[in-house]
Amino acid sequence: MPLQFDSSRYQRLESLSLNSSSPAAVRFTTDQGQAVLVEASAPGVFRLSMGTPAATGKPVSGSATRAAALHDLLARDEAIGEAVVEQADVAGQPGWRIVQGDNVLEIAANPVRLALYRKGQQVLASSADEDLCPLGTEDASAPASWALCFDLAAGEAVHGLGESRIMLDRRAERVVSDEAESRALPLAWSPRGWGLYVNTLESVVHDIGLPEFAPDSYVVTVADAQLDVFLFVGEPAEILNQYTQLTGRAGQPTLWSMGAWLHQAADTGAEQLAAVAGQMRSRGMPVDAVSFRPPAAWEIRAKLNLEWDAARFPDPRQVLGEFKGLDLKVCAPGFPGVPTHSPMFAELEDKGWLLTDESGAAQVFAGVPASAGGSFGLLDLTHRDVWTFWRDKIRQIMDEGVDAVSCDIQFDIPDGVEARNGDTGARLRTAYPMLAKRCLFEAAAWNKTPPEGVVWSRDLFPTGQRLPMQAPVSVPNTWEGLAESLRAALTSGASGLPAHAHDIGSPEHPLGTMTPELYLRWLAAGVFSSHLRFHAVPGLLPWDFGDEAFQQAQTLMQWRYRLIPYVLGVIEDAARTGLPVQRSMALSFPDDPEAHAHELQYLLGPALLVVPAVGPGNQIRVYFPKGEAWWDLNTGWRYEGGTSWTFECGLDRLPVFGREGHMLCLGPAAQHTGEFNSARILDEVWLFGMPVHNPSVMRNKIRVMQMQGSSYAKGLEGLKILPSEGLEVKRRGAEVRISRAR
């Protein structure tokens, strides 16, 4: 791709004519012979497919193999919406209006331009800049690339598109889908009420208001013969709902994964990790799982099988048993690489089971941490037999006592490398991590109903939201590093990923900058996240900062374990709605621009407003979003929305506020989730004003009904209830009555 978008490369689509229409689809043809299909994909979702007459209007499948069919980009391909097409005057040109209730897609015929309307208000329109191409292709007879250009309103923010540690608003950025440094995901949206998703495995370049050539435009370049794009209309939460329904939603993480993790230090063995885990237990610091560092714990060696690394794990059962004796789950690293020194490398090359170079020989990749620095080949997971082999062998490993698998590697697949199904270039770079990580999840979740599993991975790829957890980024041990980790979590959530883990510091950066104050603030942010991980590294352990700090860390971790039922309920809700655990202000309150400016505030699920301390000192500025009231978890005081306050928040306080009308369901304090009563993990319920919704917390279902000024809740029997000021709580048999105090 060129460094700058060149509109002169593209021919505008002109003279669109209507061929046929039905309630779900409208077919057009251009004078250049392009076929254009517009579908009412779902309520508030329009799908545009453009290509040569030979194209059907549907995208080509990612691969012809069963493995690829299991991991196609779309979980739902058929249109389920209905629309009415009307002839209309569009900006002085003939055109059409495709109407879905309050949502309208306008198409001008000459030249072809698009505009989206929501409740009568235009939210997105093709660029009016004459130097840009509103919609075009390089060659009408044989298109190889497409361009779409849209106007951006003054000050309009664009969210999503993957992980960013710099800003939540992606405006003034270039994002390239198949470049590792872009940390890209395919969904973009605006608080104005539009979203965009390009359905392709090929390279997509997003130029979002770049000041050097198009500061007021959003330019999308798609390196594919066929353009397949979805346009969403609605609130950001509605867009995420529709997008994840379309592309697939997360499986369920296991309960224990929401407890604390402990990660192995570099240049240490299993014995040292077990010793630190034992210290966590003896010092009363809760922990549920340990994870081993790369390299991979097993390799394909002399037999077509996975064999443990005998140097690090001479007796795997003994090692795993030691951690089981501490009530700990174990995550071991693996990746689909075959070392070149392995006797199996040549055999697998002869079988055609490895990705190949331009000569047809197995591609040899330079060493990475996952391969212990040694060169390797990659299993061709587009091949059905290879995919099935690797999945089944991972299952066998897990049957030996491994609870989760990590594959924390960014696959660097250069141009010229080819898979057996013909995928190469950007297409292979996009598809390969999808296949690898999904294969691991199926191996982890194969015998569980509903599917439950954990794959620890930092890589990003389309359909990544189908996995329940994203591993954290490595950031400096500074206040800015803490802020970067929060932005990474919020931007990945805004891109459709449901859960983002937090590391408590980074052993990959100097440790001298980590102060007791910074450590406790970092830990507090991790407590109010979906997952968190400690490092078994001196200088990053909770007892390394003095007795007082350690006691405060213990208090924070008690909070973490009490929050697990609530967090689990939020993740279960993500599988239904597509909303992430950590929700940015722009995602949660699109109509409150002042809230957007407080970018590091976030909602943890629907009920809790979290305001992390990201600088030294005890004063923390909080903005309460409009239209809501908020209750301080520390004092019980109530604050009206649309106001700002400065709080004195010492290291012993949590800057967290409950949203009025919601409930916070807490579990008991515990040292690990195995101490929870699996039949009922709830211990206490906090009420923030009169409950007005119907929350569900894991298997403990809570139903709320309103009647004559009171709320009746079922599912609270036997639980301690803490009402907010001004409420009365009375138990009547199996029901709890909540009413205003008289």
Image: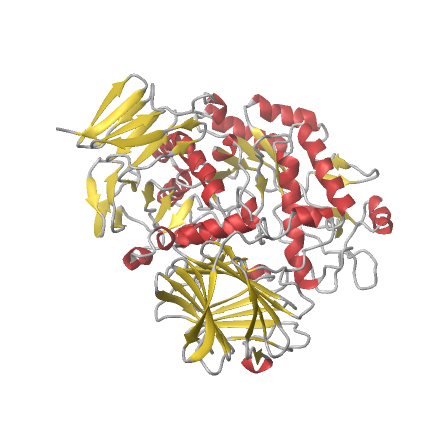
Is residue 313 placed above or below 410 in the rendered structure? above
Q: Is residue 313 visible?
A: no
Is residue 229 placed above or below 377 in the rendered structure? below
Q: Residue at x 57, y 40 (%)?
A: 265
Q: Position of residue 378 (x, y in %)?
A: 74, 51
Q: Is residue 342 visible?
A: yes
State which quadrant residue 730 falls in. top left
Could you say which is closer to the camera, residue 463 or residue 291? 463
Q: Position of residue 598 (x, y in %)?
A: 32, 55
Could you say which is closer to the camera, residue 170 or residue 421? 421
Could you say which is closer to the camera, residue 553 or residue 176? 176
State which quadrant residue 451 falls in. top right
**Quadrant location of the N terminus in the rendered image:** bottom right
Q: Residue at x 58, y 59 (%)?
A: 199
Q: Position of residue 162 (x, y in %)?
A: 50, 56
- Farthest left residue? 742
Could you say which is closer to the camera, residue 196 or residue 457? 196
